[in-house]
Image (cartoon, rainbow, N blue to C red):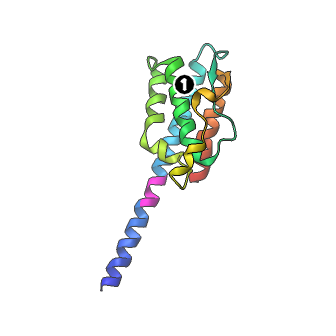
Amino acid sequence: MKLIVFCLFTIYCCSLVKASYPMERKKLQEVLRELKMLKHDIPNTELMMNTPPKDIEDCCCLTALTCFRETLLQHFGISGKYQKKLYKSLNHTLTISGLNFCNTETSTTNCSTCHSHPKEKASEFFNRLESLVQRGLSRIN
């Protein structure tokens, strides 16, 4: 009897873990939609911004996400409708868990700081943020 209860409990716990993936996927898709709306709304795509590289290591994805958030806030603020929505979505726990590709907590020490990344045009900044989010989506699917 105890074994049956234990097995049912294990199955239940596994189903809870798997249930979070559709929510993460939905949130990352929302981030992509908001990002596209913001890209169309930004008048100055020539603005130079600190931009994480294309080939971000798995354990540095959250550091890169933080850099994208800070740079968005610094250059655009959250005064506009699309800026505010995107900033809130990038801060959401589902976005963070969807982009957390690292298996260990200690591996983030080798990640570059935001200010050490080279400055790129805003259009490239948004393309790289979009690439990071799409990477999260492909990991979940």
Q: Position of residue 95 (x, y in %)?
A: 48, 42
Magenta residue span: 17-21
Whether 97 is drawn above or below 122: the answer is below
Q: Position of residue 91 (x, y in %)?
A: 44, 35
Q: Position of residue 49 (x, y in %)?
A: 62, 21
Whether 121 is drawn above or below 136: the answer is above
Whether 46 is drawn above or below 96: the answer is above
Q: Which residue is mark 1?
A: 71
Is residue 43 rendered to the left or right of residue 86?
A: right
- Determine whether the residue tagged by mark 1 lies in a helix, strand or loop: helix
The N terminus - image quarter: bottom left
Instruction: Say whether residue 19 is magenta.
Output: yes
Which residue lies at the image location 50% right of the left edge and 37% below the top edge?
30
Is residue 2 rendered to the left or right of residue 91?
A: left
Q: Nearer the viewer, residue 139 or 64?
A: 64
Location of residue 37 (image quadrant): top right
Q: Main secondary structure of the magenta part?
A: helix
Q: Nearer the viewer, residue 76 or 27?
A: 76
Which residue lies at the image location 62% right of the left edge and 45% below the top edge?
135
Instruction: Say whether residue 25 is magenta.
Output: no
Is residue 136 rendered to the left or right of residue 86?
A: right
Whether 114 is drawn above or below 132: the answer is above
Crowd class of label 1 (few under 14; some 14 to 19; many from 20; radius 10 Å): some
Please state which amino acid type lies under the numbered disc 1.
Thr
